[in-house]
């Protein structure tokens, strides 16, 4: 795949992904463990969630760097782009009132977020901040699955303790993201006539 197309997929993935996370935060029906922490820090500090995502993302990248994995430009760009889109979305739209509208937005946001993750995987321009930290830990001899579960457990526990958003959306994202990607990626490999190399499973 040509570089310009990969960059386009990356930009679309970041824009759609950031807006999707913003929508999930807006309806308050639960977000992924990574954003449970971001929303918890925002609740306690008074900062915007997008701003706290910059802080957590920077800490993850610096942690990976301390473990020997140097920052990648597109990983840094993803942190900046996601945070900016989250803040833009939350500062533009009002929180829906009815449970029906919130539930409908939840469904659309979940599908859009999975689509965004797929675009970022197709772009193959570097892992996200949590994935970079996970890969740095794996390089130290920890099994990939254990590193992923450990990071997600820490993110969720810390975020929950800080009052982060937890709900049905959190459960769906944790249980369904892996199966959804396993269902979507093989047909895309056939369409592209090339294997989709996943450097690291997404930490959500």
Image: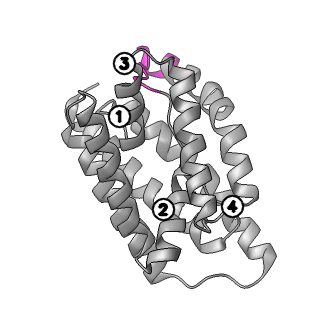
Instruction: Identify the image quadrant of residue 133.
Output: top left
Kindly report the distance in space between the C-alpha atoms of the residues bearing marks 1 and 4.
24 Å
**Closer to viewer: mark 3 or mark 2:** 3
- Where disc 1 sits, the SS reads helix
Residue holding disc 2: 38
Contact? badges 3 and 2 (CB < 8 Å): no
Residue occupying image coordinates x 25% and y 29%? 69
> Relative to the observer, which residue lies in front, 47 or 194?
47
As drawn, is 23 to the left or to the right of 90?
A: right
Residue holding disc 4: 166
The answer to which of marks 1 and 4 sits earlier in the sequence is 1
Relative image position of residue 148 (x, y in whole percent): 53, 31
Q: Is residue 130 above or below residue 86?
A: above
Residue holding disc 3: 140
- Please give the range of residues in magenta: 190-200
**Closer to viewer: mark 1 or mark 3:** 3
As drawn, is 158 to the left or to the right of 106?
A: left
């Amino acid at each position: 795949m040509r570089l310009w197309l990969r960059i386009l997929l990356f930009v679309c993935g970041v824009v759609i992904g950031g807006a999707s996370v913003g929508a999930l935060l807006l309806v308050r029906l639960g977000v992924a463990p990574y954003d449970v922490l971001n929303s918890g820090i925002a609740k306690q500090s008074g900062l915007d969630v997008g701003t706290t995502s910059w802080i957590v993302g920077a800490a993850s990248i610096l942690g990976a760097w301390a473990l020997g994995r140097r920052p990648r430009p597109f990983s840094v760009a993803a942190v900046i782009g996601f945070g900016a889109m989250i803040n833009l979305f939350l500062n533009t739209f009002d929180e829906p009132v009815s449970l029906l509208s919130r539930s409908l937005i939840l469904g659309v946001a979940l599908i859009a977020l999975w689509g965004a993750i797929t675009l970022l995987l197709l772009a193959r321009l570097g892992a996200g901040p949590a994935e970079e930290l996970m890969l740095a830990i794996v390089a130290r001899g920890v099994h990939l699955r254990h590193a992923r579960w450990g990071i997600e457990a820490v993110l969720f526990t810390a975020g929950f303790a800080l009052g982060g958003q937890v709900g049905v959306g959190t459960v769906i994202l944790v249980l369904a993201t892996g199966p959804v990607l396993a269902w979507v990626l093989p047909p895309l490999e056939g369409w592209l006539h090339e294997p989709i190399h996943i450097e690291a499973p997404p930490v959500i």
